[in-house]
Amino acid sequence: MRSRALTSKTNRMRTRTAFGMVLALAMAGCGGGGAVTGPSITAGPPVYRLAADDKVRVNVYGEEGLTGTYVIGGNGELSYPLLGSVKAGGLSVPELQAVLTNRLRRDFVKDAKVSVEITEYRPFFVLGEVNRSGQYPYRVGLTVNAAVATAGGFSYRANHKVVAIQHLNQPGEVRYRLDPSLQVLPGDTVRVLERFF
């Protein structure tokens, strides 16, 4: 009888301990001012979509007058010779290349050979606990640490473990664990959070 009571008491203590551990883990996950997603956004490079302020170089083989560098305007369009306004925002580089090729072949250049490349990406922004908040030119492969260095480095109040990033055309920011591989995309707004003392 005493052995059964002792076993029952031991089981209750184990249950309480397990419940306490689950509760502690849940609270730890909720701490720090918001959820944190996986360690990086580099799982696979997303298809790059053109948007305002991207600068592209269009080459049309054998057609000097149609070759040049163009900036995508705020309305997502670029002004191109012979074709006028061409919708580029939201397209990938190969998609824009196909649009230009098809329209030129249809109306102006029978065997148009068109290539498109990005010469300058839209800028990114750094806010929060850095020494020089602002807008900066993007370069391929940019990490959050490099973006922060561009903005003068972390302030003394900066959180070195979590960072908030709002991607272009997304309604809100997402928090990420800050690690060396965490990348910034063109048009991103990176907000360095304040640490709790």
Image (cartoon, rainbow, N blue to C red):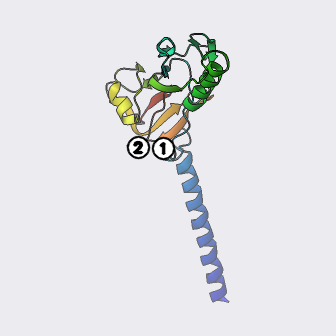
Packing grade of label 2 (10 A; few <14, some 14-19, many >=20) is: some
Of the numbered discs 2 and 1, the one sitting upstream in the chain is 1
- Residue 18, horizontal then vertical, whole percent: 59, 66
Q: Mark 1 points at which residue?
A: 42
Q: Which mark is residue 181?
A: 2
Quarter of the image with the N terminus is bottom right
Q: Nearer the viewer, residue 164 or 120?
A: 120
- Position of 122 with respect to 98 (left or right) is left
Identify which residue is drawn at 51% across, 27% down. 115
**Which percent across, then down, holds residue 194?**
43, 31
Front in this rendered view, residue 187 or 132: 187
Q: Which amino acid does label 1 sit on?
A: Thr
Against 85, residue 158 (above or below) is below
Q: Distance between the residues labelled 2 and 1?
A: 7 Å
- Element carrying mark 2: loop
Q: What is the total number of numbered labels drawn onto the structure image? A: 2
Return the x and y of residue 75 as percentages of the image width and height: 62, 14
Dot 2 and dot 1 residues touching (CB under 8 Å): yes
